[in-house]
Image (cartoon, rainbow, N blue to C red):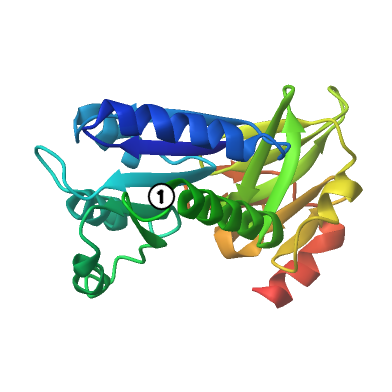
């Protein structure tokens, strides 16, 4: 799921952006959701602080109570992965804003080929997600895009005949074999059981005596079998 988060006090611009997003995403096979705000408020604050698959912020520079750059600062306090685009009516501010070091993806003038520039930016972002360390899969009839870094472990659930992908805040049942899912992952995932692979970067500790793997988010799994203990000890 890709989440587009719009914040602009001009209703016409918000509506235009929603229509542009619908048009731009049409050729792509993924689910998305648009959140639209006229200003910074508690709902936007909660959204910023709630982890999700992928977020793309499109923020107006000038807003009633908190500017787009102020909102970008709030985002970067908790999230350096999401994409931020700033809309501005003042091109001369771009250099000044770059010095903020907030990893702004693009600055787009509302008066300089606005629709085409926004389309180019979103196309570039989507293509980037498709080629970077992102796994795409269908779960419960929805297409999801999840960063590999967010995955803690993947296991085969025999009763449901599904592969379960576990992240920091969700579990996704997938109708694919474990071996097919593993082809989409990288070297940070190591086998700990014939039916489980874990992201070793997310391991907090291991209780080898009781066959328990503890992760940094206070969750654990008992998918640790004798055949894989030696390799895991050497790895860690």
| In the image, residue 225 above or below residue 140 | below
Return the x and y of residue 40 as percentages of the image width and height: 19, 36
2 on left or right of 79: right
SS at mark 1? helix
- For the point 79% across and 70% down, the residue is 230
Q: Residue at x 39, y 27 (%)?
A: 15
Q: Is residue 49 in view from this perspective?
A: no
Nearer the observer, 30 or 113: 113
Near-viewer residue (195 or 212): 195
Q: Quadrant of residue 170?
A: top right
Question: Dot 1: within a 10 Å radius of its alpha carbon, few (fewer than 14), some, or many (20 or more) residues?
Answer: few
* 91 sits left or right of 103 in the view: left
Q: How many marks?
A: 1
The x, y position of residue 224, in whole percent, is 75, 51
Q: Is residue 129 left or right of residue 191?
A: left
Q: Horizontal placement of 186 versus 104: left or right?
A: right
Residue 210 x, y percent position in the rendering: 66, 49
For the view shown, which residue lies furthest in the left direction? 65
| Residue 113 in the image, given as x and y percentages of width and height | 42, 53
Q: Residue at x 24, y 31 (%)?
A: 10
Q: Is residue 214 or residue 114 the one in the foreground?
A: 114
Mark 1 = which residue?
Answer: 114
| Between 136 and 155, the one nearer to me in the picture | 136
The quadrant of the picture occupied by the N terminus is top right
Residue 163 can be seen, yes or no: yes
For the C terminus, which image quadrant? bottom right
Looking at the rendering, which quadrant does residue 200 occupy? Answer: bottom right
């Amino acid at each position: 799921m890709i989440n587009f988060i719009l914040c602009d006090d001009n209703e016409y611009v918000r509506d235009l952006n929603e229509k542009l997003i619908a048009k731009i995403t049409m050729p792509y096979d993924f689910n998305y959701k648009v959140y639209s705000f006229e200003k910074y408020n508690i709902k936007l604050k909660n959204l910023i602080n709630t982890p999700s698959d992928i977020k793309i912020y499109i923020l107006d520079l000038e807003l009633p109570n908190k500017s787009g750059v102020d909102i970008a600062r709030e985002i970067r306090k908790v999230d350096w992965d999401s994409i931020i685009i700033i809309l501005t009516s003042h091109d001369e501010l771009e250099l000044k804003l770059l010095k903020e070091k907030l990893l702004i993806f693009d600055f787009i003038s509302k008066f300089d080929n606005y629709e085409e520039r926004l389309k180019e930016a979103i196309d570039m972002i989507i293509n980037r997600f498709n080629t970077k360390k992102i796994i795409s899969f269908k779960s419960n009839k929805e297409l999801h895009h999840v960063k590999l870094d967010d995955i803690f472990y993947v296991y085969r659930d025999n009763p449901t005949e599904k592969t379960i992908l576990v992240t920091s805040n969700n579990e996704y049942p997938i109708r694919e074999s474990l071996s097919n899912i593993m082809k989409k992952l990288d070297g940070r995932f190591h086998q700990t059981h014939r039916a489980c692979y874990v992201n070793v970067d997310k391991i907090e500790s291991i209780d080898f005596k009781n066959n328990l793997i503890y992760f940094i988010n206070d969750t654990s799994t008992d998918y640790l079998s004798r055949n894989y203990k030696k390799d895991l000890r050497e790895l860690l």
